[in-house]
Image (cartoon, rainbow, N blue to C red):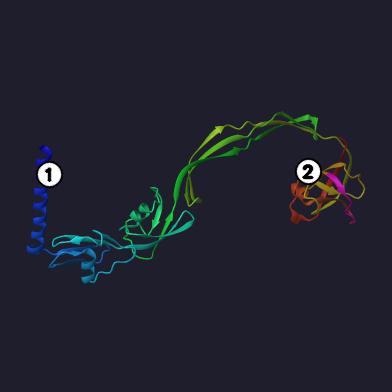
Amino acid sequence: MKKWLIGVFLLGVTSLFLSQREERLFKSEKPVSIHVFDGSFEIAASIPQSKTVEEILSEMGVVVGEHDQVFPEKETRVFSGDDIYLTRGHELRVIVDTGERVFWTEAPSVEEALMWENISLGEDDRVQPKRETRVSDKMRVVVTRVEVREETKESKILFETIVTEDEKLSWRKKIVTRKGENGIKSSVYRVAYHDGKEVSRKLLRTETTKEPESELVTQGTLVQVGKSHRGAASWYAYTGTLAAANPWLPKGSYVRVTNMDNGKSVIVVINDRGPFAPGRIIDLDKVAFMKIASLGAGVINVKMEEIKN
């Protein structure tokens, strides 16, 4: 009994809906509105009878492209007062993640088009044209991935060497009494990357994580000299070390050369032969000559002492 009553009720409601639908068809003068979502136009026109969406669009001269979306579907019959929505499809060319993607979209803005295509955007990513830009056909969009992070770089703090002289120790002796150790400095940078390439680096802070430890050295200064010679000294570029040339002293022997005009002296090793000009007793390597005189002096008066220890 209850099922029978429900059936009668539903039949009555359906009949009422259909009669109201027919009444709208023949009595209403409200137009059908077509909304085109590409920023171009909106159309409204009255129709004398029920027609399909496709028929109405054709009569109104609205061309529907292959990639356009229509709601309701083209086969749907509409009545006066109904709305038709047409969303234009646009071809989009997106440069992203070192590649290119081409697709059609009905999204209104660049950001929505990317989102619909499952191209996620980070908060700092750059989009050109801007995210809120309305999509247009054949638009080219460039997405630059931006990553900003803090990076720590460690560098050495070189230790200093403290030398103590010992006059009882031979000048050729050097004793390390405590080995030096470099310290460590940590520098924190704010680094920005565009598509994985570093574009900027800013120093935020620096701190010493390990102090350097000085090296302690004892250097002997005792020099025992033998024969002394006086004469002229010149210079030449040879090995770039504290070395010199002499006509007669054994190679490998050491001499102390003193500039008689200013009292400056340097100890050099004999590793070459010469000079052979009259009055010249030694030819100092350029580096050694600069210890006791300017290169512009050319030739200077010196005392050359043979070293025994």
| Residue 265 - label | 2
Q: Looking at the picture, how far across and down is residue 173, in whole percent?
A: 79, 33
In the depicted structure, whether residue 168 falls above or below residue 57: above
In the depicted structure, whether residue 56 falls above or below residue 162: below
User: Which of the pair 287/29 is nearer the observer?
Assistant: 29
Which residue corresponds to mark 1?
Answer: 7
**Dividing the image into 4 quarters, which one contains the N terminus?**
top left
Q: How many marks are shown on the rendered structure?
A: 2
Q: Looking at the picture, how far across and down is residue 60, in whole percent?
A: 21, 70
Q: Looking at the picture, how far across and down is residue 106, in whole percent?
A: 32, 59
Q: Which three-letter amino acid code belongs to the residue tagged 2?
A: Ser
Q: Is residue 83 left or right of residue 65?
A: left
Secondary structure found at label 1: helix
**Dividing the image into 4 quarters, which one contains the C terminus?**
top right
Q: Which three-letter amino acid code belongs to the residue tagged 1?
A: Gly
Q: Viewer-nearest of labels 1 and 2?
A: 1
State which quadrant residue 70 falls in. Answer: bottom left
The segment highlighted magenta reads 269-276
State which quadrant residue 275 falls in. Answer: bottom right
Q: Looking at the picture, how far across and down is residue 154, in whole percent?
A: 56, 39
User: Which of the pair 173/289 is nearer the observer?
Assistant: 173
